[in-house]
Amino acid sequence: MITNLGEITIEDGVIVRIDPDKKGPLVALPGLVDLHTHLREPGREDAETVESGSRAAALGGYTAVCAMANTSPVADTAGVVEQVWRLGREAGLVDVQPIGAVTVGLGGEQLAELGAMADSAARVRVFSDDGHCVHDPRLMRRALEYVKAFDGVIAQHAEEPRLTTGAQMNEGDVAARLGLTGWPAVAEEAIIARDVLLAGHVGARLHICHVSTAGSVELIRWAKSKGWRVTAEVTPHHLLLTEDLAVDYDPVYKVNPPLRTEADVLALRRGLQDGTIDCVATDHAPHSVEDKECEWAYARPGMLGLETALAIVVQTMGPQWDRIADWMSAAPAKIAGLAGHGHPLQVGQVANLTIFDPDARWTVDPTALASRSRNTPYAGMELRGRVEATYLRGEPTVLNGKATR
Ligand SMILES: NC(=O)N[C@@H](CC(=O)O)C(=O)O
Ligand SMILES: [Zn+2]
Ligand SMILES: [Zn+2]
């Protein structure tokens, strides 16, 4: 089959020709890769399934997503990660790469069978207790030592739980005014400081999930200057939104780590621009209506991200297409060790790609999203730029802004 996308020609799933003079107004990017997605299956299929989340991902321009382990049962054995991997293949909309839990049941007490997950059909290379912090420093050290043997990586949700008990939003003036318990920046920074030291000591790879504070950016910059193998991600929402949105107690803005201050947002953008932060990851966190549309204190933290990520990154960082290809495709593919993803658009490469219309305007309608949940913080917002088409190994998963299956 030969497909002609303006300047790019695909044949049998491979890019066979690029004619720069045929370049039109649309932007072609390598298929996006999300390092941090919650697909909720098994266990919370009411909020999302591998299939619905895969469709949301394809519509957002993704060709691969890494599925977080905080499912029920937890993805802490070869059996569960293989199940998620198989469900991803059946859905066939994106490559679903399971992340394995670091500890049994995310309990933080006993290492999970990391080697068995690595050797399974799912070939797990990224391990995370996301949702929870691997709190015990000795266990963290052992996890880093263990994955070093097969060049795996520990992705840490950096949150010192003793400093965030009962926390509801960023600690500061706004929380004080609203009467909500604060989640201080130091709770994130203290764990990052500890873990970059551990990663340096062990010589293993550490990845920091959803970096949210200016101080965290400084610590990661310092760790990288030491030559330690540390990478980091930022979410689209932490690049745009601030704590002030909590004023009306709308729990759609409740998220972990919390939305921070304008100064943090600007530091995160600078950190991404100067390479301190390696990539953008969505932390797509679907939650059911019961879990989300209730009082702030009872609502689960988390927001949708897959279908809006690219437009938000273009809005916050500008149309720097080569950098965006790095932040949202090459860098996350490299961190996750995903062969066949993240390569530049060149003749001879597998045709995983995204066609983006930078001028299309659309209004986010939570009920029109492919996700089974509707907890988007961008409801009613007009966004500029939309994914027109997504190709996975040359096959369209999205055409004219609609999923093909
Ligand atoms: N980000 C969130 O607020 N929630 C995530 C967990 C997490 O990423 O820590 C979830 O699983 O809902
Ligand atoms: Zn997390
Ligand atoms: Zn998460």
Image (spheres, rainbow, N blue to C red):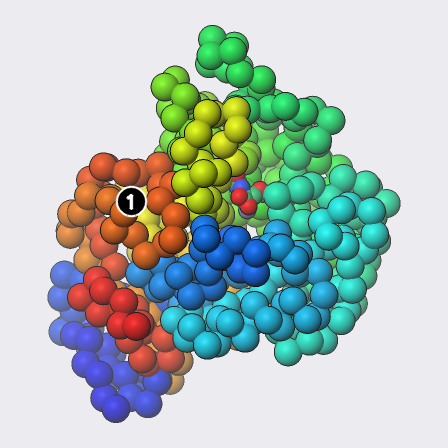
> How many discs appear?
1
Residue pictured at 50% horizontal, 32% vertical: 299
Q: Which residue is mark 1?
A: 366
Q: Quadrant of the C terminus?
A: bottom left
Q: Is residue 22 visible?
A: yes
Q: Position of residue 285 (x, y in %)?
A: 48, 46
**Which quadrant holds residue 22?**
bottom left
Q: Nearer the viewer, residue 71 or 320?
A: 71
Pinpoint residue 398: horizontal percent, then vertical percent: 27, 68
Mark 1, ligand 1, within 8 Å: the answer is no
Q: Mark 1 packing: few (<14 Cα in 10 Å), some, or many (20+)? A: some
Question: Given the current orientation, which residue lies at the most extreme top position?
Answer: 177
Q: Residue at x 18, y 66 (%)?
A: 400
Q: Is residue 13 left or right of residue 112?
A: left
Give the image quarter of residue 386: bottom left
Q: Which residue is farthest right?
A: 138
Label 1 SS: helix
User: Left or right: where does residue 84 sit relative to residue 191?
Assistant: left
Q: Residue at x 23, y 88 (%)?
A: 2
Query: In this picture, is 104 found above or below 337?
Result: above
Q: Amino acid at mark 1?
A: Pro
With 159 as the anchor, is 197 left or right in this view? right
Please state the horizontal and vertical placement of residue 131, each as a whole percent of the image: 61, 43
| Quadrant where the image shows the N terminus | bottom left
Q: Is residue 247 or residue 11 the one in the foreground?
A: 247
Q: Residue at x 39, y 17 (%)?
A: 247
Q: Is residue 177 above or below residue 185?
A: above
- x and y percentages locating residue 244 in the rendered image: 39, 20
Is residue 224 visible in the rendered structure shown here? no
